[in-house]
Image: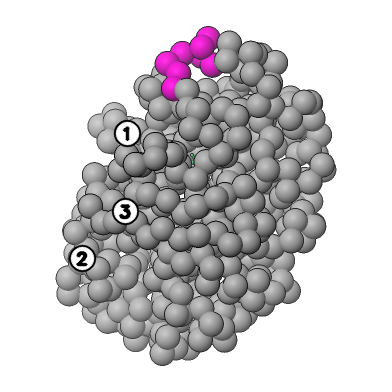
Amino acid sequence: MNKRIFLKLSTAILSGFSGARLFGRAPDEPASDGKLTNWAGNYQYGTDNLHPFTSIEEVRKFVKEHDSLKVLGTRHCFNGIADSAHALISLKPMDQVVALDAKARTVTVEAGMSYGQLCPYLHEKGFALHNLASLPHISIAGACATATHGSGINNGNLATAVSALELITANGDVLTLSREKGGDTFLGAVVNLGALGVVTRVTLDLQPTFMMRQDVYENLPLAQVTDHYESIVSSGYSVSLFTDWQNKRINEVWVKRRVEKGDAPDAQPEFHDAKLATKNLHPIADLSAENCTEQMGVPGPWYERLPHFRMGFTPSSGEELQSEYFVSRQNAVEAILAIERLRDQVSPHLLISELRTVDADQLWMSPCHKRPSLAIHFTWKPDWDSVRKVLPTIEKELAPYQARPHWGKLFTMEPAQLQSRYERLPEFRNLIEEHDPHGKFRNEFLNKTLGK
Ligand SMILES: Cc1cc2nc3c(=O)[nH]c(=O)nc-3n(C[C@H](O)[C@H](O)[C@H](O)COP(=O)(O)OP(=O)(O)OC[C@H]3O[C@@H](n4cnc5c(N)ncnc54)[C@H](O)[C@@H]3O)c2cc1C
């Protein structure tokens, strides 16, 4: 097991990091000091007081009896959004399918379940979700709380599949909201940032299961992206562009397509002057592709092609930080060129960038609220001191496009600026006030980013 780099946070005042103390250990290694950290090990939670629960009644009782707590999902956020100085609860033992409604095409799951647990079950029953993130290891409730997304011009983020949810509010009441009957409140509650209560059950839309293939192309000239952006991102069900911003090229294009009867078995050898890869690749070309999902056009179930990383392996590079910004797709090319101009500042600290598209939605706190979006992602080397210096420059360059940061990743944007980019934030604050009047589920991150 790799030893994690221990880095000291010098001025821990930036969004997401206020309250953090040290970068930490590998998440699946027991810490020598017994401290609890997030997946990346860069964020140490404010308490080790972690309570796992096995039933809704236990959760209700705990919520009623405590003044301040947060829920931990699978700990994949890079900032303090899930943190508590007092008590953390885990619903991980609550990870069962509650109901599969084949007629309505929905599945209801307990909130501790991860996509990796759910997907093989759904496939076996003949169903699929519309999309997945780069990895299946994350909890469904935690992913939807932060509007986690995959790629695809017609694919909304993962939270757009939520058709109902059940949550325990601050006084211990059970609140059930659905798309059909929940009206505006439902639209405010799905991407909830963990601020409205403890989600105990989630219902997701399904579709018939499908097979997919992914083909990877290498060295796509940047000029092709600027000239043919829409055609490139529309070339598959889900398309990801990986770049290190060097040499005016996209290093790898991952095109994920649904396999339909009568499709040509072979992929085109060229794609906008990029060449078809002849072996499986990792998004960071130097790393082994062993932990990546199957490529080379080999058909497989949707849940083994939509994520980049396979269940059962450490996803991504393992030692990293992440940031991501969403801009309107109509500004995609300008925004890409704006970051490309920063290449000499960005690249030294970067492992890889990924460009994905996400469809617009109506969820109040979604970064894709009313905007078909381009998501510009950065996987950074685990050196926060350097990363926190480059983020303000990126945020300044993307400011003309009203960029919204990913809720679960690292950003330094001033709260006032961030708040101005969410037109439904006043209503979301009202929703919090209604369901959590004494701030039981608030923490430093939420106080700072959402304001009062
Ligand atoms: C390697 C890696 C790859 C990633 N890839 C992607 C990607 O492809 N696309 C993308 O958009 N993001 C990606 N992310 C970010 C990740 O998906 C989000 O941070 C997501 O929120 C993680 O879910 P979690 O359960 O681990 O959340 P946690 O960090 O545990 O919690 C996130 C938030 O959800 C809340 N929460 C969790 N469970 C509940 C519950 N039951 N009730 C109420 N609130 C709850 C927490 O309180 C917190 O506010 C990636 C992260 C990593 C580490």
Amino acid type shown at disc 2: Ser
In the rendered structure, which segment of residues is drawn in magenta? 52-59
Q: Which residue is mark 2?
A: 288
Residue 47, relative to residue 240: is it above or below?
Answer: above
Q: Residue at x 43, y 39 (%)?
A: 35
Name the image quarter holding the C terminus: top right
Amino acid type shown at disc 3: Pro
Q: Which residue is mark 1?
A: 117
Between the residue at mark 2 and the residue at mark 1, the CA separation in whole angstroms equals: 25 Å
Q: Quadrant of residue 198?
A: top right
Between residues 448 and 222, which one lies in front from this camera angle?
Answer: 448
Q: Which residue is mark 3?
A: 315
Q: Secondary structure at mark 2?
A: loop
Q: Is mark 1 within 8 Å of ligand 1?
A: no
Between the residue at mark 2 and the residue at mark 3, the CA separation in whole angstroms equals: 12 Å
In the rendering, which numbered label is found on residue 128?
none
Residue 81, relative to residue 435: is it above or below?
Answer: below
Q: Position of residue 239 (x, y in %)?
A: 41, 64
Between residues 215 and 284, which one lies in front from this camera angle?
Answer: 284
Q: Secondary structure at mark 1?
A: helix
Q: Is mark 2 within 8 Å of ligand 1?
A: no
Q: Quadrant of residue 436?
A: top right
Q: Residue at x 53, y 29 (%)?
A: 88
Q: Position of residue 283 (x, y in %)?
A: 32, 68
Q: Position of residue 70 (x, y in %)?
A: 58, 31
Q: Is residue 29 visible?
A: yes
Amino acid type shown at disc 1: Gln
Q: Find the residue positioned furthest to the front.
A: 33
Q: Which tag, 2 or 3, sits closer to the chain's start?
A: 2
Q: Residue at x 34, y 86 (%)?
A: 273
The crowd level at tag 3 (other Cα within 10 Å; few <14, some 14-19, many 20+) is some
